[in-house]
C-alpha cells in the first residue's frame, strides 16, 4: 500500500468521526431542555470574578420583625443584613465618640463626627452645628442686616430733614487745639482699621445676596478671599489702636452731672438749641464707654478666638460657633452705633471733620458746641494749645485752618 492510499484512508476515517460527533451533538441539543433567560444572569453572576454585592432584602427580608432589631449593634446587624450599617451611623448621629490616636488634651473632638444636641438662644434643640446655623441664618443675618438698613435710613431722613448743624455765630479766626497729633493718629488708625473690618464683614456676610448675582461666582469668590485676608490682618491693628484710643481719651470721657441734662434734651439735635457740655458731650461718652470699651472688648476677644490667636485655648467646634455668634451680634451693634458717630463727625456737623483732620477748631465752634470746655479754656484750667508744637508756635501755624 503506497502513501497516497494511506492518506486517503485517514481522511475518510476523520470525516466519518466528524459526522458521528456532529450527529450526537445535534441529538443532545434536541433532547436537552432549553435554558431559561433568567438563568443566564445567574451563571454570569457566579462566574464573575471579585467581591459580589449582597441584597440585604433578599438575604433577610423579615429581619426588622425581630423585637431587638432596633437595639442591634453593627456586628449583629451585619450577620442578618450584610452591608446595613444603620446602627453605627445612628450612633454617629447621636454624637458618639469613636477611637482616635490623637491625644484628647490637644484634640478632644478627633473621634467625634457630629456634635451633641444643644439649644442656643434662637435655635431649636438640635445638633450644635445645626443650632449655630439656625441662629446665624435665621437671626443674625436677617435682623442684623435690617438694623443696619434702618439706622442708615434714619440717618438719611434726619439729614434730609435737618441738614448739617451750622454755626450760628461768626468765626473769629482764633483757633483752639482740640486734638493733638497723637490723638489724631490714634483715632485715624482705629477708624481706618474699623472701616476695613466693616466693609469686609458686610461683603462676607451679605454680599452673596446683593453682589454675587451681579459680578458672578468667580469674581465674588476672589473678592471675598481678598477681603477675608484684609479682615484677618486689620483685626489685630484694630485691637491695638482701640487700646491706644481708650487710654488716650479716657481722661475727658468720665461722666459728669451735666451729661444728664444733655441726654434729657437729646443734645439739642431736634430743638436746635445747643446744650452746654465739656470737651466731649454725653453722646460721645456713650459711644466711648459702650461702643469703644464694651462692644470693642467683645468684638476683639471673639475675633481673636476666630483667628486662633489666643495661646493655650483648645479650639473646639462649639468654641468657634459661640465665638462666631457673639462676634456677629457685637459687630452689628458696633457698626450701627458708629454709623451715627461717623455721621456727626463728617456731614452732620460743620467743622467736626476738619477738627479731627487738622486738630483745630475756631473759638466760635468751641463755644457753641462745647461751651463748658470753652469756658475752662478761657479760665485757664485747660491750655488752648496742648501739643508741644502748637504751644511753641502759639497756634499761629493753624490760625488759617478751616473750622
Image (cartoon, grey):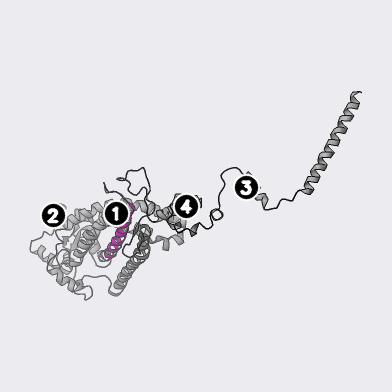
- Tell me how far mark 1 sits from mark 2, CA to CA: 41 Å
Q: Position of residue 396 (x, y in %)?
A: 16, 57
Disc 4, disc 3: CB below 8 Å?
no
Q: Which residue is mark 3?
A: 45
Query: Looking at this view, is 87 or 212 the one in front?
Result: 87
- Tell me how far mark 3 sits from mark 1, CA to CA: 60 Å
Q: Secondary structure at mark 3?
A: helix
Q: Secondary structure at mark 1?
A: helix
Q: Position of residue 395 (x, y in %)?
A: 15, 57
**Residue plotted at (21% across, 54% down):** 243
Q: Overall secondary structure of the magenta stretch?
A: helix
- Tell me how far mark 1 sits from mark 4, CA to CA: 47 Å
**Residue 77 — which label?**
4
Res. 168 visible in picture: no
Which callout, 4 or 3, points at the residue further toward the start of the chain? 3
Q: Which residue is mark 1?
A: 303
Where does the magenta region start and end?
Answer: 314-340
**Residue 391 — which label?**
2
The quadrant of the rendering that contains the N terminus is top right
Query: Looking at this view, is 238 or 23 the one in front?
Result: 23
Which callout, 3 or 2, points at the residue further toward the start of the chain? 3
**Mark in the foreground, 2 or 4:** 4
Query: Looking at this view, is 176 or 10 the one in front?
Result: 10
Based on the displayed image, in which of its 4 quarters is residue 399 positioned?
bottom left
Above or below residue 54? Residue 170 is below
- Tell me how far mark 4 sits from mark 3, CA to CA: 25 Å
Res. 31 visible in picture: yes
Which callout, 2 or 4, points at the residue further toward the start of the chain? 4
Q: Would you say 211 lies left or right of 193 here?
A: right
Disc 3, disc 1: CB below 8 Å?
no
Label 1 Cα neighbours within 10 Å, binned few <14 / some 14-19 / many ≥20: many
Residue 327 among those drawn in magenta: yes
Amino acid at each position: 500500500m503506497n502513501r497516497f492510499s494511506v492518506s486517503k484512508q485517514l481522511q475518510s476515517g476523520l470525516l466519518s468521526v466528524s459526522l458521528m460527533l456532529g450527529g450526537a451533538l445535534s441529538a443532545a441539543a434536541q433532547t436537552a431542555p432549553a435554558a431559561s433567560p433568567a438563568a443566564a444572569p445567574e451563571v454570569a453572576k457566579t462566574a464573575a470574578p471579585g467581591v459580589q454585592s449582597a441584597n440585604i432584602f433578599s438575604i433577610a427580608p423579615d429581619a426588622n420583625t425581630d423585637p431587638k432589631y432596633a437595639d442591634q449593634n453593627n456586628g449583629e446587624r451585619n450577620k442578618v443584613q450584610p452591608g446595613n450599617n444603620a446602627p453605627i451611623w445612628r450612633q454617629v448621629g447621636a454624637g458618639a465618640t469613636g477611637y482616635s490616636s490623637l491625644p484628647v488634651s490637644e484634640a478632644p473632638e478627633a473621634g467625634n463626627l457630629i456634635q451633641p444636641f444643644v439649644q442656643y438662644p434662637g435655635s431649636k434643640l438640635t445638633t450644635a452645628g445645626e443650632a449655630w446655623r439656625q441662629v446665624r441664618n435665621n437671626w443674625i443675618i436677617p435682623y442684623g442686616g435690617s438694623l443696619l438698613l434702618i439706622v442708615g435710613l434714619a440717618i438719611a431722613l434726619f439729614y434730609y430733614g435737618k441738614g448739617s448743624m451750622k454755626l450760628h455765630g461768626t468765626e473769629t479766626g482764633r483757633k483752639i487745639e482740640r486734638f493733638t497729633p497723637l490723638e489724631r493718629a490714634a483715632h485715624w488708625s482705629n477708624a481706618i482699621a474699623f472701616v476695613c473690618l466693616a466693609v469686609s464683614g458686610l461683603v462676607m456676610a451679605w454680599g452673596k445676596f446683593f453682589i454675587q448675582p451681579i459680578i458672578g461666582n468667580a469674581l465674588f469668590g476672589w473678592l471675598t478671599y481678598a477681603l477675608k485676608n484684609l479682615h484677618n490682618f486689620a483685626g489685630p491693628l484694630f485691637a491695638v489702636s482701640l487700646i491706644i484710643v481708650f487710654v488716650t481719651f479716657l481722661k475727658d470721657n468720665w461722666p459728669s452731672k451735666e451729661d444728664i441734662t444733655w441726654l434729657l434734651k437729646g443734645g439739642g439735635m431736634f430743638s436746635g438749641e445747643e446744650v452746654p457740655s465739656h470737651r466731649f458731650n454725653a453722646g460721645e461718652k456713650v459711644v466711648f464707654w459702650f461702643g469703644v470699651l464694651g462692644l470693642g472688648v467683645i468684638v476683639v476677644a471673639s475675633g481673636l478666638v476666630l483667628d486662633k490667636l489666643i495661646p493655650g485655648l483648645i479650639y473646639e467646634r462649639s468654641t468657634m460657633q459661640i465665638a462666631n455668634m457673639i462676634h456677629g451680634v457685637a459687630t452689628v451693634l458696633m457698626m450701627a452705633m458708629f454709623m451715627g458717630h461717623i455721621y456727626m463727625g463728617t456731614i452732620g456737623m460743620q467743622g467736626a471733620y476738619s477738627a479731627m483732620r487738622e486738630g483745630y477748631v475756631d473759638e466760635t465752634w468751641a463755644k457753641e458746641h462745647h461751651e463748658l470746655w470753652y469756658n475752662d479754656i478761657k479760665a485757664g484750667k485747660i491750655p488752648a494749645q496742648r501739643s508741644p508744637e502748637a504751644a511753641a508756635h502759639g497756634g499761629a501755624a493753624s490760625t488759617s485752618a478751616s473750622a
